[in-house]
Image (cartoon, helix red, strand yellow):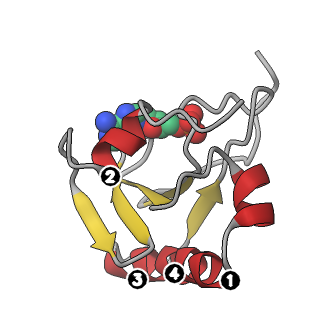
Amino acid sequence: MSYDDQNIFAKILRGEIPNKTVYEDDHVLAFEDIQPQAPVHVLVIPKGPYKSMNEFSAEASDAEIVAWVRAIGKVAEIVEAKEPGYRLIVNNGEDAIQEVPHLHIHVLGGRRLGRMLQKAD
Ligand code: AMP
């Protein structure tokens, strides 16, 4: 399946719906999650049309990959989560229950986060 340019993050990137931006550069946008699961909950997305880590890891340029990884670190610093810590999550595909088909990494923190995984539904 090809990239769906009507997905919600594509609309955010085009400025069609608002977002609370935490960080932005040429390749990356980071913004607050609309339904935060922790006091800190930021999504960091590449600006390019990548559905998931599958496409991004195989097809993105080195510059895009470097920018995304660096941006994750910058966001952790901006939201003051480097200490005492934070969690990064990428839901990739159906088993991970990826809801939005544009690659995003969740940056979660601001409280003790508990165990990494729960039992499946
Ligand atoms: P995932 O299940 O990994 O695909 O996560 C999708 C995330 O996008 C969820 O945490 C949603 O709360 C978040 N989300 C959906 N729509 C928006 C929006 N308009 N602005 C910010 N976050 C959103």
Circles 2 and 1: CB atoms closer than 8 Å: no
Q: Which residue is mark 4?
A: 73
Cα–Cα gap, marks 4 and 2? 21 Å
Marking on residue 13: 2
Query: Is residue 40 among the parts visible in the rendering?
Result: yes
Q: Residue at x 64, y 76 (%)?
A: 65
Q: Indicate which quadrant contains ligand 1.
A: top left
Of labels 1 and 4, earlier in sequence is 1
Q: Which type of secondary structure does the marked residue at label 3 adopt? A: helix
The residue indicated by pointer 1 is: 62
* Alpha-carbon span between mark 4 and mark 3: 6 Å
Q: Please say if the residues under marks 4 and 2 sit with CB atoms less than 8 Å apart.
A: no
Q: Which residue is mark 3?
A: 77
Alpha carbon distance from label 1 to label 3: 23 Å
Sort mark 3 into few (<14), some (14-19) or many (20+) by Cα contacts within 10 Å: few
Q: Residue at position x 46%, y 36% from top? A: 5
The reply to whether callout 4 and callout 3 are in contact (CB within 8 Å) is yes
Q: Amino acid at mark 2?
A: Leu
Name the kind of residue labelled 3 in the image: Glu
Amino acid carrying mark 4 in the image: Gly
Location of residue 54 in the rendering, given as x and y in whole percent from the top left corner: 78, 51
C-alpha gap between disc 2 and disc 1: 21 Å
Q: Please name the amino acid that badge 1 sits on.
A: Asp
User: Foreground: 69 or 85?
Assistant: 69
